[in-house]
Image: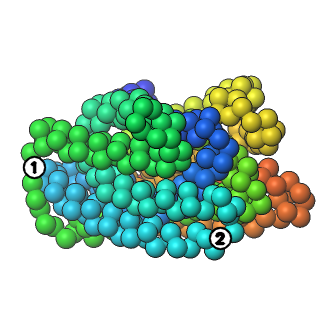
Amino acid sequence: MQSRSFYAKDILKIAGPIILGNLGFIMIGVGDVIVAGRHSTSTLAAISLATAITNCIMMLGIGILATISAILSNYRGERKSIESYFLPSIKFAMFLALITSGLIFACIPLISKLGFEQNLVPIIKDYLFITGLATFGAYLHCALKEYLQAFEIVMFPNMLTIFCIFLNLCLNILFVFGFGIIPEMGAIGLAISSLIVRYFMGFVLLIYAFLRTKIGDNSDYKYFKDLLKVGFPASLAIMIEFAGFNIISIVMGRVSGIYAAAHNLLCTLTSVSFMVPLAISNATAVKVGYTNGAKFYKSLKEYAYTGIKISVGFMACSAVFVGIFAEFLTSLFTTDVELMKICVPIVYVLCVFQIFDGLQVSLSGIFRGIKQTKIVMISNFVGYWIIAFPLGCVLAFKFGLNLLGFWCALGISAIVLCTIMLISMIRKFKKLEV
């Protein structure tokens, strides 16, 4: 029987580079928000509303692709050769990208009818069009990163993401503010930067995977079936969560663009610390997936509970830090006094939300590992749409709390959905013991 420190070290060995990569990925988004905020509040409001729409659509495919590493880890535990799933993973990703880009393009004519401020509408439309084109690069990168993660190859893919922080920031500044013959493009410049960076990440990782692993093409329809069976509920769960957050941007953006900008700023702030438990969740999913495939159920439980402890412990420390430096952290994103007045009081509610957010993402990783993701979808639907959105509307509009009301509701919903998932996990583990 291995010691508990063994399981923690084993998870952190995989999670360490993923943490850096996840932080790099979110820092790319942070760079967008900072540059947009420095350009103008209107630019920040426009990309906030645009990404609120595109994120909900793109997460449907990203959620399915995120199960590649868990599925292949199960196969590896069953002593199957997983190199042969390289080309099928890419084909599957491109098929999903085609569907996703079509959905994004279909949303463009609807923007004029959503009641946004008229000066933001053409910017949002252009941003959506460019993002639709970037989907193929984003999905290629995601599929290959997950494929390599199943082999526990995590260093290069995540170091690539770190490099792209600086590439994206340089391109943002160049295209947003203009330089020399390149004109000032504002929010459109951010979209062009993202398109270039996403394709760059996808093709570099494609070359690396060709050199690093044996390439195979196993047209095993069981693989696609497993991806859909496990991935579709998981992707719906992620989409439900993203939609729950982004509908707040849309609803409050109809009141005023500054609320959409504030909500985007707050989501970006919490996303930075969220990348650590997300990485722990990914590493836990790989180890739980392997032990589940190999039927090492005692080790499976140890990996699961260790991942939860690390994630929740980190988020508790993060909540204390963010609470102490709330005003300073907000000032990093904007110099707009009115925007800061909206954001700073909500940061203290966000601190409580963070702890339970760390717990729920850990539980999601465990359920991906054991290929039981329907409960994640159900709990997210209950948390965000049965509780958070209706309660948030009441607190925001009936009691006049506006954006603060929605964040109070998000905190309550996080507690509820974590409770549902935790009870389900304990019951599942009892069945495995039997």
Q: Amino acid at mark 2?
A: Leu
- The answer to which image quadrant residue 350 occupies is top right
The dot on residue 114 is: 2
Q: Say above or below: 152 vs 219.
A: above
Residue at the image point whose x is 50% and y is 70% from the top: 107
Where 271 sits versus 246, above or below?
Answer: above
Drawn side of residue 191 relative to residue 70, left or right: right
Choose between 287 and 271: the one closer to the eye.
271
Kind of element beneath mark 1:
loop
Closer to the camera, 374 or 189? 189
Q: Which element type, helix, strand or loop, lies under badge 2?
A: loop
Q: Which residue is mark 1?
A: 215
Give residue 174's position: percent from left, percent from top.
Answer: 44, 34
Could you tell me which residue is drawn at 35 percent across and 29 percent down?
163
Please indicate whether residue 432 sits to the left or right of residue 144 in the image: right
x then y, percent, for residue 338: 80, 40
Q: Are marks 2 and 1 in contact (CB under 8 Å)?
A: no
Q: Residues within 10 Å of mark 1 (few under 14, many from 20)?
A: some
Q: Pick the residue in front: 253 or 94.
A: 253
Compare marks 2 and 1 and give the one earlier in the sequence.
2
* Quadrant of the rendered image containing residue 367: bottom left
Q: Is residue 134 visible?
A: yes
